[in-house]
């Protein structure tokens, strides 16, 4: 079992930056991939970014490419999402996701609110 706890959300003006963190309660070595999703009010949850265990492969939804960067620090059991040039349409609850490849189980964090004002 692993708990994922997000932090770093908040209110920011358009064009600003935020860095989200997802801290795991134990080693994320077997958690592959780890990813960020978001859900805006009245909309379905949307994939944002994904990173493999070694950090060698990343993937992003088209709307954030060039603005967001996902990274992971396995030594700190943490995944990050650096968000730059934020837009009002980035406003959502951002949740961390991980898949344990050993026990084949999905994990979700509780989410952190990101609000971008125009």
Image: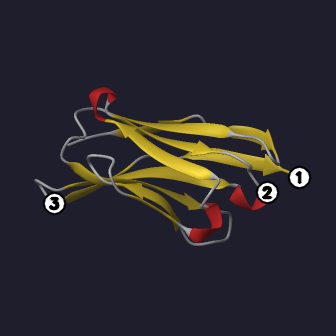
Residue, disc 2: 88
Question: Which residue is the extreme one toward the right?
Answer: 118
Is residue 9 or residue 71 the one in the foreground? 71
Label 3 or label 1, whichever comes before in sequence order? 3
Please tell me which residue lies in front, 45 or 31. Answer: 31
Identify the residue at horizontal 53%, vertical 48% (top origin): 69
Q: Which residue is mark 3?
A: 104
In this rendered view, identify the residue nearer to me: 7 or 17: 17
Asked which quadrant contains residue 19, the reply is top right
Residue 26 pos. (x, y %)? 24, 32
Of marks 3 and 1, the one in the foreground: 1
* Distance from the alpha carbon under mark 1 to that under mark 2: 6 Å
Give residue 118's mark: 1
- Residue displayed at 65% across by 56% down: 92
104 to 79, vertically: above or below: below
Whether residue 9 is visible here, answered yes or no, is no
Q: Earlier in the sequence, mark 1 or mark 2?
A: 2
Classify 69 as above or below 59.
Answer: above
Q: CA distance from mark 3 to mark 2?
A: 36 Å
Colouring convention used in this rendered image of the protein: secondary structure
């Amino acid at each position: 079992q692993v708990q994922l706890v997000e932090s770093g959300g908040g209110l920011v003006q358009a064009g600003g930056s935020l860095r989200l963190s997802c801290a795991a309660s134990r080693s994320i070595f077997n958690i592959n991939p780890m990813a960020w999703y978001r859900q805006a009010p009245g909309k379905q949850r949307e994939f944002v970014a994904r990173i493999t265990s070694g950090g060698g492969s990343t993937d992003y939804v088209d709307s954030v490419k060039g603005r967001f960067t996902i990274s992971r620090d396995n030594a700190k059991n943490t995944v990050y999402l650096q968000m730059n040039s934020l837009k009002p349409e980035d406003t959502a609850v951002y949740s961390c996701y991980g898949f344990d490849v050993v026990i084949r189980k999905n994990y979700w964090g509780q989410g952190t609110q990101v609000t971008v004002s125009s």
